[in-house]
């Protein structure tokens, strides 16, 4: 009797450990598709590092600008776009002047498209309320340069190709002292340019993909970073803070958290089932 | 029945007819943006087809992507770097001193000559000199505050379990924060012990402490791996959103 049960159950345990990866992919697609089509709201509590970034940007005085360094492309749209959109909502609803630049040659157009789409909502005018410094191929020289003289370093804007001092948005802005915070929205390690070479005392924020966040946290605790947005969760945090303070609405951060949580649930379940099957089959083989 | 690459290729070419028709309908209904999304959806599916197995459709799209990226790189190298930072200042604004870079750049190409390859080392040495100075400054700015921050207090400033303001800028240390700092201190010293090779780990205490460091590193790697999974899934969710909502219009888009 015992032997019969073992013989019947062992193949199932082995099968559980050898499920075809294509079946797992199919299950994953279904698990993600359902909450994408019919969104579900996952409760959220913003992290202190997200809140700190929000507070720093929100405290921007009228004589300063915020610099968004948008070093991401469509590859990481799932995380970086939500973060940047939430920050732009806050900046525009609070009428804060800002500039964008990028360390990635492909990032320039992506950032420009996103800012233009959000600017339409708030009536933000290029040259008056915001400006594009364009692609900056030499990160070190750019950061060191704007620390001393922003106008001479960047010289011309990337859209109108006009001298920076001729644009109303740059009124009273000369160097890094006139920047409230630099926010590096990135899918690479470009935050180190700012940490290493920006004039001491100027705040730096970091909106990164989740994979980079654990590496960035030590710089937050040592005050080298004023705040961090941790991937899609960071975007959700920022959207929530915007909604709480009426500085913006919901976006991809909240939209993606449902499917993301469902996918994590599937991974945890798969790990649990796979390990359980492995332990049971080992136990049976020993018997 | 296993389809050969040739059969898959023929089917893909035949499918181009309804696909072109679909693209035209998308263009009529949603304009240029709709056509972009339609093509984006097709390319996304073609890329994901490799999850089933390697196939010519995937390879075709992969080559198109690489070709576009290479072409874009060349254009950007000229339009955003060489033109704006070198050609325009010299030939349009007549800042002739920038010409000194030209011989240095030419010297770099002597690396292809067996006899004169030593010349290519001159620009390399100059660049190394610049880089060494820059890296030194970068190292100090990046790591000195980290070393300073590793001296953490183990004595709480308030005797509550929870911190009312957990932001590092608030400088409030609760009991849980003090425990956290103690864990940090143990992690730092034990991991350093593990990597300290100047003396042999002879005593049981040092060996044990280094082992603790090893385990703590494993926990750290686990957390980093978890974050990696989070990123990959977020990117997948975004692609699924693109296909299901933006391309197929199966749900409401984000407003």
Image (tube, grey):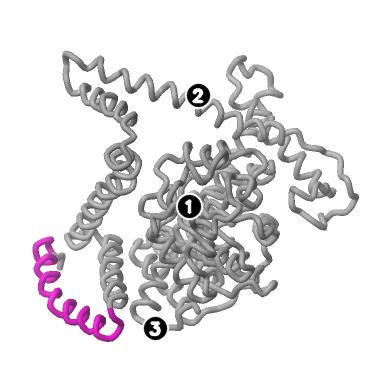
* Chain identity of mark 2: B
As for residue A110 lying within the magenta part, the answer is no
Of residues A239 and A258, which is closer to you in this image? A239
Q: Are marks 2 and 1 on the same chain?
A: no
Residue where numbered disc 1 is placed: A164
**In the picture provided, is B39 more to the left or to the right than A160?**
left
For the residues labelled 2 and 1, the Cα–Cα distance comes to 30 Å
Q: Specify whether disc 1 shares its chain with disc 3.
A: no
Quadrant in which residue B110 is drawn: top left
B49 relative position to A79: left or right:
left
Report the chain holding disc 3.
Answer: B
The image shows residue A245 at horizontal and vertical percentages of: 69, 72
Q: Nearer the viewer, residue B78 or A90?
A: B78
The residue drawn where x is 59% and y is 25% is B195
Q: Are marks 2 and 3 on the same chain?
A: yes
Residue B12 lies, in percent from the top left, at 14, 70
Relative image position of residue B134 (x, y in whole percent): 50, 28
Residue that carries the numbered disc 2 in the rendered image: B133
Residue A283 is situated, as x and y percent measured from the top left of the image, at: 52, 52
**Which range is magenta?**
B4-31
- Point out the residue furthest to the right here: B159
Q: Which mark is residue B250?
A: 3
Q: Residue at x 30, y 78 (%)?
A: B34
Q: Residues within 10 Å of mark 2 (few under 14, many from 20)?
A: few
For this view, does A244 lie left or right of residue B228?
A: right
- Is A200 situated above or below A34? above
What separation in Å lies between label 2 and label 3 (alpha carbons)? Answer: 56 Å
Q: Chain of mark 1?
A: A
Q: Quadrant of residue A202?
A: top right
Considering the numbered disc 1 on the image, is that residue within a helix, a strand or a loop? helix
Secondary structure at numbered mark 3: loop
């Amino acid at each position: 009797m015992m032997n019969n049960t073992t013989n019947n159950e062992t193949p199932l345990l082995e099968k559980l450990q050898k499920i075809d990866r294509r079946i797992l992919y199919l299950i994953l697609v279904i698990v993600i598709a359902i909450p994408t089509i019919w969104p579900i709201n996952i409760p959220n509590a913003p992290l202190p590092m997200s809140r700190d970034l929000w507070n720093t940007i929100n405290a921007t005085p009228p004589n300063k600008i915020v610099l968004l360094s948008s070093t991401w492309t469509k590859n990481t749209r799932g995380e970086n776009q939500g973060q940047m959109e939430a920050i732009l909502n806050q900046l525009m609803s609070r009428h804060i002047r800002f500039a964008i630049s990028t360390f990635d040659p492909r990032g320039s157009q992506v950032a420009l498209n996103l800012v233009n789409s959000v600017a339409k909502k708030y009536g933000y005018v290029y040259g008056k309320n915001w400006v594009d410094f364009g692609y900056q191929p030499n990160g070190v020289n750019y950061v060191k340069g704007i620390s001393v003289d922003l106008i001479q370093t960047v010289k011309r804007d990337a859209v109108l190709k006009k001298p920076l001092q001729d644009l109303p948005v740059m009124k009273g802005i000369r160097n890094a002292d006139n920047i409230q915070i630099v926010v590096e929205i990135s899918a690479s390690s470009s935050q180190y340019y700012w940490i290493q070479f920006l004039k001491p005392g100027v705040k730096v924020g970091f909106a990164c993909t989740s994979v980079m966040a654990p590496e960035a946290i030590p710089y937050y605790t040592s005050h080298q970073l004023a705040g961090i947005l941790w991937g899609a969760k960071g975007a959700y945090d920022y959207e929530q803070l915007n909604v709480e303070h009426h500085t913006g609405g919901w976006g991809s951060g909240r939209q993606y958290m449902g499917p993301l949580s469902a996918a994590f649930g599937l991974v945890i379940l798969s790990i649990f089932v796979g390990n359980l099957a492995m332990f049971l089959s080992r136990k049976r083989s020993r018997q | 029945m296993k389809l050969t690459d040739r059969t898959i290729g023929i089917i893909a070419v035949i499918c181009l007819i309804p696909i072109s028709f679909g693209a035209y309908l998308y263009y009529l209904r949603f304009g240029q943006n709709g056509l972009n999304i339609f093509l984006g959806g097709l390319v996304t599916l073609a890329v994901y087809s490799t999850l089933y197995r390697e196939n010519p459709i995937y390879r075709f799209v992969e080559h198109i992507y690489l070709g576009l990226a290479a072409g874009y790189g060349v254009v950007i190298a000229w339009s955003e770097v060489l033109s704006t930072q070198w050609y325009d200042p010299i030939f349009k604004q007549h800042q002739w001193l920038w010409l000194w870079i030209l011989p240095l750049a030419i010297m770099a190409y002597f690396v292809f000559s067996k006899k004169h390859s030593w010349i290519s080392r001159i620009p390399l040495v100059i660049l190394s000199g610049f880089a060494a100075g820059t890296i030194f400054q970068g190292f100090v700015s990046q790591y000195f505050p980290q070393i300073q921050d590793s001296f953490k207090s183990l004595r709480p400033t308030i005797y509550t379990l929870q911190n009312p303001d957990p932001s590092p800028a608030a400088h409030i240390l609760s009991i849980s924060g003090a425990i956290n700092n103690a864990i940090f201190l143990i992690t730092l010293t034990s991991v350093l012990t593990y990597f300290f090779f100047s003396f042999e780990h002879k005593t049981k205490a040092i060996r044990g402490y280094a082992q603790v460091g090893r385990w703590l590193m494993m926990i750290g790697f686990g957390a980093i791996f978890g974050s990696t999974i989070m990123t990959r899934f977020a990117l997948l969710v975004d692609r699924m959103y693109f296909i299901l909502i933006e391309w197929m219009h199966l749900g409401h888009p984000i407003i």
